[in-house]
């Protein structure tokens, strides 16, 4: 198995790394035999979050290829922040090439063997294809594609990668959120959950809804978003951007370890709608005084109208699922992005809420169905917690809310947050890469995931 190459950026060239005009640094004894990362055109802050932690298997020299502009500056500033923080600072050495031929330059030099890509989503499929054709593993932020044409290319990429023994993997952080993990664990316990109901479009078997905000804080600082982030032609719509996470969770929870096929999917309904931003809002989150020319197509009078919200109702292996993505400008003070989920079983519902009642922190509820015997259900639930759950997550406790509802009291150590999930996903990816042991369902289900979002996009845009 080839090593993973990840490219990182240099913030102060005089202090760390090499500039684009100098030779590639020689590999030190400490870095020999390690995976090397290459980061391509990092336009989204997720590219930096991959580097919020160090990894034993990964070379601390990272190579970044990007065009000149604010995106690369912001990326390097974030890495420098990780390197200079007081608690557990990182030691990344960023080696940067800036130029319009950044993709060709990376392919000709190939200082690493894993490409990390997180930026303009409309360009990702081109980058991914180029990397695989050049024999480079791909570690990609979602989404890898934002339209049906891109999906067709992605299918062929997976075939080529398999022939070459290369890994293409997207960063599914939400699988590591503890309430989601425990919802999945309990759904697999038939004595507690029973089985997943078939559901209806009005009352789906499984529902996933996330509310996001354009203005928020990352690593304790206000997040500055690039202006292109508000262009759905470059970033994608809610249907095929954030929905990637939700569709992934539907598959991962409702059909654990099951290899899915495109024929398992049928879109019932898909729609999208807009969120509007004023110039003042736009400046607050981008720093720009005016809307760029490429956004004029989306102006409605003085407001920028962004087609960033979307919902999908679809059938997956006979079960009806619903995903919804909603974007607001800014969360109320003390709150942030939120997640709601429900899995409906023949014995109980497993519900994740993150509203005011939960102090905007995700909380998992177990609501027994009316026809269940209360004492027997509670006994089975307690057994599930004390055995299956506590074997993996010690300290999780069951608390009763009323005669039909319980919730899980989860120790703080498991509530690590979105940014820390990047370390968990990356560690998983590195393990797959080193041991060549990725589960058989991962690639087929990635294909089905992007097929679902692409078909939903087609449905919403023709109706």
Image (cartoon, rainbow, N blue to C red):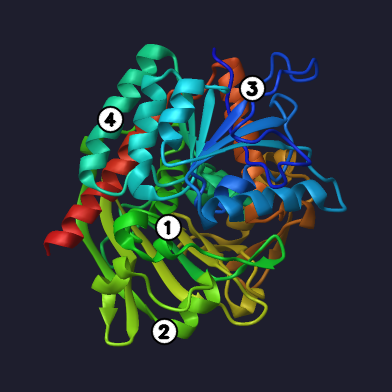
* Residue 414 point in image, percent of width and height: 73, 51
From the viewer's perspective, is residue 65 above or below residue 28?
A: below
* Residue 261 point in image, percent of width and height: 27, 33
Q: Is residue 317 visible?
A: no
Q: Looking at the image, which is closer to me, 177 or 218?
A: 218
Measured Cα–Cα span from mark 3 to mark 1 = 43 Å
Measured Cα–Cα span from mark 1 to mark 2 = 40 Å
Quarter occupied by the C terminus: bottom left
| Residue sitting farthest toward the left | 462
Give the mark nearest the N terminus, 3 or 4: 3
Q: Looking at the image, which is closer to me, 409 or 160?
A: 160
Q: Which residue is mark 3?
A: 35
Q: Residues within 10 Å of mark 2 (few under 14, many from 20)?
A: some
Q: Which type of secondary structure does the marked residue at label 3 adopt?
A: loop
Give the mark nearest the N terminus, 4 or 2: 4
Q: Residues within 10 Å of mark 3 (few under 14, many from 20)?
A: many
Q: Which residue is mark 2?
A: 278
Q: Residues within 10 Å of mark 1 (few under 14, many from 20)?
A: many
Residue visible at 12% across and 60% down in the picture = 462
| Residue sitting farthest toward the front | 21
Tell me the mark number nearer the camera, choosing from 3 and 1. Answer: 3
Q: Which residue is mark 4?
A: 155
Measured Cα–Cα span from mark 4 to mark 2 = 39 Å
User: To which quarter of the image does residue 134 belong?
Assistant: top left
Give the mark nearest the N terminus, 1 or 2: 2
Measured Cα–Cα span from mark 1 to mark 4 = 32 Å
Mark 4 and mark 2 in contact? Answer it, CB < 8 Å: no
Mark 3 and mark 1 in contact? Answer it, CB < 8 Å: no
User: To which quarter of the image does residue 129 belong?
Assistant: top left
| Residue 344 tag number | 1
């Amino acid at each position: 198995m080839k090593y993973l190459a990840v490219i990182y950026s240099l913030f102060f060239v005089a202090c760390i790394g090499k500039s684009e005009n100098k030779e590639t640094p020689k590999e030190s004894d400490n870095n020999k035999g390690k995976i090397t990362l290459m980061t391509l055109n990092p336009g989204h802050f997720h590219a930096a979050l991959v580097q919020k932690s160090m990894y034993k298997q990964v070379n601390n020299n990272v190579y970044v290829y990007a065009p000149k502009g604010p995106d690369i500056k912001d990326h390097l500033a974030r890495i420098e922040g990780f390197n200079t923080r007081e608690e557990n600072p990182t030691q990344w050495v960023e080696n940067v090439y800036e130029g319009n031929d950044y993709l060709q330059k990376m392919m000709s030099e190939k200082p690493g063997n894993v490409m990390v890509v997180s930026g303009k989503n409309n360009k990702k499929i081109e980058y991914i294809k180029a990397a695989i054709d050049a024999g480079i593993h791909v570690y990609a932020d979602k989404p890898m594609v934002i339209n049906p044409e891109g999906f067709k290319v992605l299918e062929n990429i997976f075939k080529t990668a398999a022939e070459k023994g290369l890994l293409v993997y997207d960063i599914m952080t939400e699988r590591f959120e503890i309430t989601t993990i425990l919802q999945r664990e309990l759904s697999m316990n038939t004595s507690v959950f029973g089985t997943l109901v078939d559901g209806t479009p009005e009352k789906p078997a499984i529902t996933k809804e996330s509310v996001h905000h354009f203005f928020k804080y990352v690593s304790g600082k206000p997040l500055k978003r690039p202006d292109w982030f508000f262009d759905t032609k470059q970033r994608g719509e809610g249907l095929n951007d954030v929905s990637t996470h939700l569709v992934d969770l539907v598959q991962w929870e409702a059909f654990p370890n099951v290899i899915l096929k495109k024929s398992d999917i049928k879109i019932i309904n898909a729609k999208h709608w807009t969120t509007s931003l004023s110039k003042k809002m736009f400046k607050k989150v981008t720093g720009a005084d005016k809307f760029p020319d490429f956004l004029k197509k989306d102006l409605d009078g003085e407001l920028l109208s962004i087609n960033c919200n979307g919902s999908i109702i679809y059938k997956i292996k006979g079960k009806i699922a619903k995903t919804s993505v909603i974007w607001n400008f800014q969360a109320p003070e003390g709150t942030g992005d939120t997640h709601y989920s429900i899995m409906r079983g023949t014995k109980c519902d497993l519900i994740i809420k993150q509203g005011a009642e939960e102090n905007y922190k995700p909380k998992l509820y177990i609501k027994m169905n009316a026809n269940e015997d209360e004492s027997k259900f509670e006994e089975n639930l307690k057994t599930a917690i004390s055995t299956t759950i506590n074997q993996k997550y010690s300290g999780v406790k069951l608390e009763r809310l009323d005669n039909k509802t319980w919730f899980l009291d989860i120790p703080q150590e498991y509530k690590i947050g979105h940014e820390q999930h990047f370390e968990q996903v990356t560690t998983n990816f590195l393990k797959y890469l080193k041991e060549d042991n990725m589960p058989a369902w991962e690639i087929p289900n990635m294909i089905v995931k992007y097929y679902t979002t692409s078909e939903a996009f087609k449905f919403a845009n023709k109706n």
